[in-house]
Image (cartoon, rainbow, N blue to C red):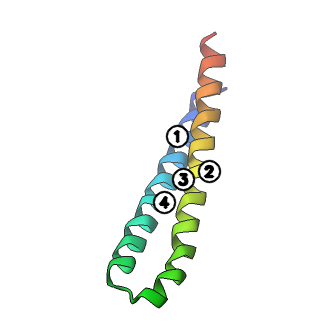
Amino acid sequence: MQKKTLLEKVTAAKQEIADAESNLERALREIQVAPRADKTTVSEVVQAAFTKLRAARTNLTELEGLVMTDEG
């Protein structure tokens, strides 16, 4: 695997994680000020954030495997 490809994967994973963190921060702010009935709608934002985190984790795990294979 070329170094460029690895760096592209790292960059993509970092962006996914940053997006997820931003979404979670926004959700937490909304939850703190939202009336109880509105807190249900925030769950969509939280779900999207967790989906992005899972994707980032998958990408990083794949990247780790690629690096380990290249080193071996």
- Dot placed on the residue nearer the N-terminal end, 1 or 2: 1
- Give whichever of 36, 46 is nearer the camera: 36
Residue at point 61% right, 42% down? 59
Secondary structure under tag 1 reads helix
Amino acid at dot 2: Ala
Classed neighbour count for the residue bearing mark 2: other residues with Cα under 10 Å, few (<14), some (14–19), many (≥20): some
Q: Which mark is residue 20?
A: 4
Is 25 situated above or below 61?
A: below
Residue 68 in percent (x, y) is at 61, 18
Residue 9 in percent (x, y) is at 58, 41
Query: Looking at the figure, which quarter contains the C terminus?
Result: top right
Is 25 situated above or below 58?
A: below
Classed neighbour count for the residue bearing mark 3: other residues with Cα under 10 Å, few (<14), some (14–19), many (≥20): some
Is 3 situated above or below 33?
A: above
Q: Which residue is mark 1?
A: 10
Residue 60 in percent (x, y) is at 57, 38
Q: Which mark is residue 55?
A: 2
**How much space separates mark 3 and mark 4, taking CA atoms?**
6 Å
**Of the residues tagged 1 and 2, which is closer to the observer?**
2
Amino acid at dot 1: Val
* Residue 58 in which image quadrant: top right
**How much space separates mark 3 and mark 2, taking CA atoms?**
5 Å
Is 24 situated above or below 71?
A: below
Q: Which residue is mark 3?
A: 53
Q: Which mark is residue 32?
A: none
Q: Is residue 5 left or right of residue 11?
A: right
Secondary structure under tag 4 reads helix
Q: Is residue 18 left or right of residue 56?
A: left
Circles 1, 2 touching at the beta carbon (< 8 Å): no
- Dot placed on the residue nearer the N-terminal end, 4 or 1: 1
Classed neighbour count for the residue bearing mark 4: other residues with Cα under 10 Å, few (<14), some (14–19), many (≥20): many
